Amino acid sequence: MKKFFVFLAVLGFITISAQYAVAQTATLTGETEQVEIPVHQQLKTKFIEGGPEFMAVILLCLVFGLALAIERIIYLTLAETNTGKLLDKVENAMKEGGVTAAMDVCRNTRGPVASIFYQGLSRADQGLEIVEKSITSYGSVQMSQLEKGLSWIQLFIAIAPMLGFMGTVIGMIAAFDAIEAAGDISPNIVAGGIKVALITTVFGLIVAIILQLFYNYLVAKIDGIVLKMEDASIAMVDILVKYEK
């Protein structure tokens, strides 16, 4: 499964790269007729022109960042629970079999909300204050699990454009070195260095933008799950108060 996600990430990067290369070629040449160039050849050309040492690292940032983002999306999707139905099941179980039956319902339900309920119900005999503390503490643990891996995605978002800018600086240095060696300012002399600078910068920004979109989506999804967890926890305490003997 992970290999499949990596393949999808690489394929997406190839598609974006090819589209950008074709658009730039048409804009710069202004030709009405476009020569059909294979996608893999376009990618190879731009990869070599941008400098393999920088482009390879930028590509790895995209691959690993997308792999982490997709893994988090799957995890968060599986972590979502219909809290309304779960609360109804827990309340019905409390009516029929007490706390033990309610714990069985939570044990057989996946997701962080059910886990938090289970921890609270397991301490129901110690008083509501202990139950609330247990729910709060275990809720923090579950929240940390939801946010796992986001820091790495942030790292790749920060590194990708920085690598692109580093390629820009190195390309400009190469251009000035060429001017110094030739003793003349000629477009042909500086074009190579400037081209490398632009290509690395563009690809670094593209990678950062793609990962930033995934990151914001994950943060929004986590916030929604946490909000449901908090509301459900309050409702859980109300159920315990209602059926406390």
Image (spheres, helix red, strand yellow):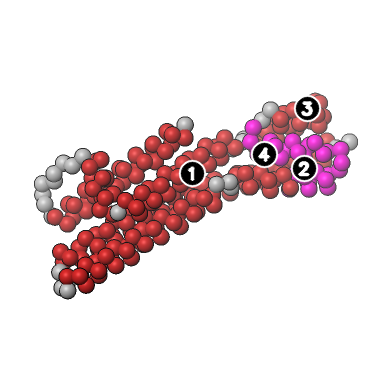
Q: Earlier in the sequence, mark 1 or mark 2?
A: 1
Give me the residue at 20% from left, 63% from top.
191
Closer to us: mark 3 or mark 2? 3
Q: Indicate which disc, 4 or 2, sits on the residue closer to the N terminus.
A: 4
Left or right, residue 22 beside residue 234: left
Give amino acid for label 2. Val
Q: Secondary structure at mark 3?
A: helix
CA gap, disc 4 to disc 2? Answer: 13 Å
Q: Residues within 10 Å of mark 1 (few under 14, many from 20)?
A: many
The disc at residue 189 is none
Secondary structure of residue under mark 1: helix
Q: Report which residue position mark 3 lands on.
A: 101
For the residue marked with disc 4, what is the amino acid?
Val
- Of residues 185 and 178, the one nearer the viewer is 178
- Looking at the rendering, which quadrant does residue 194 occupy? bottom left
Main SS, magenta region, reads: helix
Residue 199, x across and y down, in percent? 28, 56
Q: Please report the residue visible at 58 percent of the width from the left and 47 percent of the height from the top.
A: 147
Chain part drawn in magenta: 110-136
Could you say which disc has been placed on residue 113 in the image?
A: 4
Residue at mark 2: 237
Quadrant assignment for the C terminus: top right
Q: CA distance from mark 1 to mark 2?
A: 34 Å
